[in-house]
Image (tube, rainbow, N blue to C red):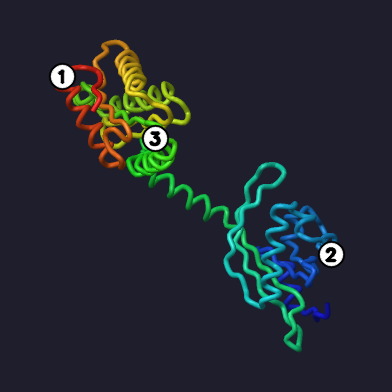
Amino acid sequence: MEIEDSWVLNTLMENTADSIYIKDRQCRLWRISRKMALDLGANDPSEIYGKTDVELFGEELGNRTLIEDKEVMEQGIPKVGLIEKYINKKGDVNWTSTTKLPLKDANGTIIGLLGITREINDIKSSEMGFQWLATHDLLTGLPNRFLLLDHIEQAIFHEDRSKNLFALLFIDLNGFKKINDNAGHKKGDEFLKTVALILTEKVRLSDTVARIGGDEFVVLLEGLITPENSKAIALKLADAIMMNVDHENHSVTASIGISLFPTNGKDAETLLKEADRAMYEAKRSNIPYRLA
């Protein structure tokens, strides 16, 4: 490959914070920046010359980049801002954004490609952090209403195809307002965290426990749920809350409303509304739970 070295290219390759590389038409590395060499564990960039991404990163990532590289060189169209995730042998995740440009000689013939890769781990961490904040309750760490609705819609899709039931348990705490009024919000927050822990421990990992506001929680029970075992689970949760939230005075109890898919509704909002209505009926009747 006839490419004239210049002091500009050398300066760029030696000092840039990005990984810069040049590949030939066989997708072999012809030139790389010092930053990229160091990331690959080589003190001298020339140690990497002639190697392919398959050799450096393994079959999965290597074959994927091979396809992208060939498209750039065969079509002559740049690829800009390719987001990639690479997990190294230690299990560390590295997120990058890559731009690939066709490299031409003086006659306009494509002889390779120029790639520039920038690490975006901080951006990705912030992005995932914002996503978590948007979908979870800050106090308890449980899914919020937004994420709960998404899980219900997924359950509707899966259970509708398998013809199975699933249940929603709408839980409201009795006596909680007195805790806040008499002992303060800090104590109330501790009780809410305890309820979140109890609910999470008493159901399966495949179930969803969400806090949708104040002292209201919802549990999504998936897979082969019947009216009988949904009532049994509701009673178990009510007993656990009464015995363990305020274990000295047992002043906090639960009223639980149960709705079943598809018996009580075929969309998330209807199922929540029916479970909420059943909860208020349980509260008025002073019983631990009621089926919609």
Please report whichever mark, 3 or 2, sits nearer to the chain's N-terminal start.
Answer: 2
Closest to the observer, 180 or 289:
289
Q: Which residue is mark 2?
A: 50
Disc number lying in front (1 or 3): 1
The extreme left residue here reads 284
Q: Quadrant of the C terminus?
A: top left
Q: Which residue is mark 1?
A: 285
On screen, residue 40 versus residue 216, left or right, reads right
Residue depicted at x 47% and y 52%: 127
Where residue 67 appears, x then y in whole percent?
69, 64
Q: Which residue is mark 3?
A: 142
Q: Is residue 182 above or below residue 264?
A: above
Q: Amino acid at mark 3?
A: Leu
Distance between the alpha carbons at the discs numbered 1 and 3: 29 Å
Disc number lying in front (1 or 2): 1
On screen, residue 80 versus residue 261, left or right, reads right
Where residue 147 appears, x then y in whole percent?
38, 42
Distance between the alpha carbons at the discs numbered 1 and 2: 78 Å
Q: Amino acid at mark 1?
A: Ser
Question: What is the crowding at mark 1: few (fewer than 14 residues within 10 Å), some, or many (at least 20)?
Answer: few
